[in-house]
Each structure stands twice: as structure tokens, then as C-alpha cells.
Image (cartoon, rainbow, N blue to C red):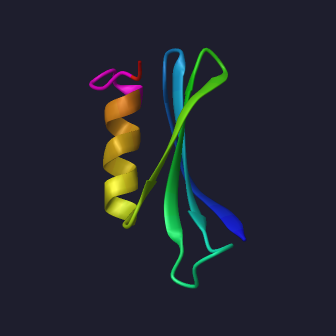
Amino acid sequence: MKDQYHTFSNENRKAEVFLDTTTKSKGVWLVECFEDEKLAKVFEGVSESWAESLSDEWVMGQISIL
């Protein structure tokens, strides 16, 4: 099961945070990063705070994906 927890957005960037418990009982945190409405990258992590930090950095332009 994949549950959405947060959405971050700024200008043309958006990040959505999910907890995916499909394959692991504790789950894995996913961050889907969008730019201009297109999915740019999906990251996997182990904590909600990590996912929120990455999302914030993405939408504020502090990180970029090549």
C-alpha cells in the first residue's frame, strides 16, 4: 500500500512524500520529484524527516537532478 503524507510545491517544482508498505512491513519512504508537471526522479529513504527535508530542498531549488 502506498499512502501519501505530504506535498511540497514552489514555482514549477513539486515533491510528494509517500510511505510505501507494499514490500516491507515497516515501509519505505518515497519522494517523487516533479519539474514542470513531469516526474524527474523518485528517491527512497528510511525516515519521514529525511523525506520532508529532501522535498523541501528540491522545491526550493537547493538540489537539482541531472
Looking at this rendering, what residue extends furthest in the left direction?
62
Q: Residue at x 34, y 25 (%)?
A: 60
Q: Tell me, yes or no, whether the highlighted magenta stretch contains residue 11.
A: no
Q: Position of residue 50 (x, y in %)?
A: 32, 56
Left or right: 61 in relation to 17: left
Q: Position of residue 3 (x, y in %)?
A: 66, 64
Look at the image and tell me in which quarter the N terminus lies.
Answer: bottom right
In the image, residue 13 above or below residue 18: above
Stretch in magenta:
59-64
Left or right: 29 in relation to 63: right
Look at the image and tell me in which quarter the C terminus lies.
Answer: top left
Q: Residue at x 41, y 28 (%)?
A: 59
Dominant secondary structure, magenta: loop
Q: Residue at x 36, y 38 (%)?
A: 56
Q: Which image quarter: residue 45?
A: bottom left
Q: Residue at x 66, y 22 (%)?
A: 38
In the image, residue 41 above or below residue 38: below
In the image, residue 22 above or below residue 44: below
Q: Tell me, yes or no, whether the highlighted magenta stretch contains residue 60.
A: yes
